[in-house]
Image (spheres, rainbow, N blue to C red):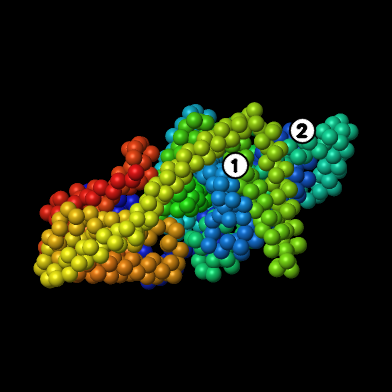
Amino acid sequence: MITHIKRFFLGDKRDPQAPGIFHKITLLAFLAWVGLGSDGLSSSCYGPAEVLQSLGKHSHLGILVGLASVITIFIISSSYSQIIELFPSGGGGYLVASNLLSPTIGMISGCALIIDYVLTIAVSIASGADAILSFLPLWFKNYKVEIAVVVLIFLTIINLRGVKESVTPLVPIFLLFLISHIFVIFYSIISHSSEVTAVSQRIASDISGTYSTLGLFGFVYLLAHAYSMGAGTYTGIEAVSNGLPILREPRVQTAKKTMMYMAISLSVMVIGLLIAYDFQDVREVAGKTINAVLIEKATTNWNPTISLIFTITTLLTESAILFVAAQTGFMDGPRILSNMALDRWLPTRFATLSDRLTTQNGILMMSVLAIVIIALTQGSVTFLVVLYSINVFITFVLSQLGMVRHWLKVRKSNPLWIGKILINGVGLVLTTFILITITIVKFHEGGWITIVITTGLILVVLKIKKEYSITKKLLKKFDILIPTMEQEIKKYSHRYKDINTSYRSKTAVLLVNGYSGVGIHSILAIIRQFGNMFKNFVFLEIGIINAGLFKGDEDIIKLKENLKLDIQQYIDLVKKMGYHGDGFFSLGLEVVQEVEKMSDEISKKYPESMYFGGQLVFPKDTLLTRILHNHIVFAIQRRFFRTGREFIILPLKLR
C-alpha cells in the first residue's frame, strides 16, 4: 500500500541508463528561466518595497536607487556568465571558491549557499502568504504559518517527482505574473504621463532638500542604506551557475540565455515598480503589501467590479510567483548539498538519487529546515530578508574574488583578461560594499543570527570532513599491505594449484567496491577461515549512479569501464591461486536492490553460492560514524535471510 501511495504522488521509477533520459529531464532556457529565474523575479515583490520603506519620507529618491540596482544586476549577471563559461559542469559559488581560492573557502561558500537556499524557500513562501493575506480578512493572519507549511509540503512533493515535473505546471503562473505586473507598471506610467515634469521636479527637489538637510554624508548614507536594503533583489542571479547540470545541451549556451532572460526581466520589474511607486505616490498601509497598494491605486478609476477582479488576480499571481520562487531553493540547494557530499564535507547520502532521479535526501532536508525557520520567525518577511541577504552576498564576494584571482593568473595566456577582470572586479567591489553595509546596518536587527547559524554549520561540516579524512587514512593502511598480501597469495597459490572447479562447486560470492587492499584482505579472510572449501570466487560490484555521475552518458560509460577493470583484476588475482574466477557488475541507484537482482543471476549460474560482504569496524563506534558510514551489508543480510540465501559479514577492523 505504501508503494502504491508513493507511486501515486511521486510517479513511476526512472531508469538512469535509458536512452535519451538526460534529454527528457533537462530544461530548456525558457523553463530554466521559470524554475531558476522565479527567485530573482519574485524578489521584485519585496526588494523595491524594502527600498521604499528604508527611504521613508524621501521616497522620490527611489528611482536613483533603482538605476543603481539595474546596473548591479547586469554587472553580477555578466560576472556569473563568465563563471558559467569557466565551469560548464556547474557548481556555482561553491565550485568557484573551491577551485580558485581553496577547498576550505569553497566549503564556507557552500555553507553560506545552503543557508541562503533554505532562506530562499522560507522568505518566498512567507512573502507569498503575505500576498494572499493582503486581500483576506485580518483574522486569517493568525494562520499564516499553517498556510506557509501546507504550501511548502506541496512544493516538496512536486520536487520529489522531478525537476521538469516541478517546473512545467508553474509556467502559466509565471507568465501571468509577468504580464499583469508589467501591465500595472506601464499603465501607471502612461496614465500619469502628463505628470512626468512634475515628478521630475519632485525628485530634483527631494534630492536638493535631502542634501541640504542631511549633508553629503547623510545623503550618501541614505542612498547606500536603501541600496543595500534592496539587496534581496539580486538574489537568485547565482542560481543558473549552480543549476547547470539540469539544463539542456549545449548547457553553456542555454545557461547564458537563461541568465539574459533573468537580467532583463528583473531589471524591468525593479526600475519599473520604483517609478510606478513614485507616479502613484504609494505609501505604506497597515495589513497590505506595497505592491497591493500600488495595484489598488492604479485601478482606482476603473469599474469597481473589474478593479476588484484585476486586483485579486494580480495579487494571486504575486503570491503564486513567490511560492514558485521557492523552486530555486529546491532545485539548487540539494545540488549544493550533493556537491559538498561528494567532496566529503557532508554525509554521502546527500549525493544519492531517488528512483525518480532526484536528490531526495537534499530536498527533504531543505524542506524540513525551511519549516523550522518559518515556525521560529513566524514567517516575518522583513526579518527573513535580513538573514537571507547577508548569506547570498558572502557567496557573491567569494565567487568574484576567485574569478579576479583566476584572471590575474591567466593574464599572460588570455589576451581578453583585462575586460574580464574588470567585470568581476567591479562585481567584487559592489558585492563587498553591500555585504559590509547590510551586515553592519542589520547586525543588531537579526543579522548576527545568520552569522551564528552559518558558523555553526561550518563547524559541523569541519567535523564531518575530519571524520571522513580519518577513515580514508585508515583504509589506506589496507592498500599499503597489498605487497604483503600478494606474498601470502603466492603461498596459497602453491597449496591449491590442483583444485578442480566447476559451476556446481562451492562458490564464494564477494561484494567488492573497487580493486583495493580491503578486497584482497576479504579474499584472504575467506580462505583462512574456510580453507579449500570454495572452488570458485565470484566478484560482484555495484556502481552507484549518484548526483556527481548523473550529468551525461559519458560519465556512465566511464563508470562501466572502471567496474569491468576492477572485476578483471580480482579474477586475475584468484586465478593465480588456482581458483576459478568470475565477475558480475551492475549500475543502479541503490546497492541493496541491485545486489538482490544480481544474486538471482549469479545463483542460476552458481547454485552452491555463499555471499560475503565486508563491514568496517571503527576504533570507536560513535553516533557520527553511524551517520556517516552506511551499513549496507546488514540490510543485504536481512534481505537474503528472507530469500534463504547465506550471507556472511566479514569484519574489517580499522586500527
Q: Is residue 507 above or below residue 461?
A: below
**Mark earlier in primary sequence (2, 1):** 2
Residue identifier under label 2? 57
Q: Residue at x 69, y 33 (%)?
A: 440
Say left or right for 167 vs 356: right
Whole-percent x and y of residue 225? 73, 37
| Mark 2 → mark 1, Cα distance in angstroms | 29 Å
Q: Quadrant of the C terminus?
A: top left
Q: Residue 175, located in which quarter of the rendered image? A: bottom right
Residue identifier under label 1? 391
Q: Residue at x 57, y 66 (%)?
A: 252
Q: Is residue 529 above or below residue 226?
A: below
Q: Nearer the viewer, mark 2 or mark 1?
A: 1
Three-letter residue code for mark 1: Asn
Q: Is residue 181 at all visible to an observer of this figure? A: no
Label 1 neighbourhood size at 10 Å, few (<14), some (14-19), many (20+)? Answer: many
Which one is in front, 9 or 202? 9
Q: The residue tagged with tag 1: helix, strand or loop?
A: helix
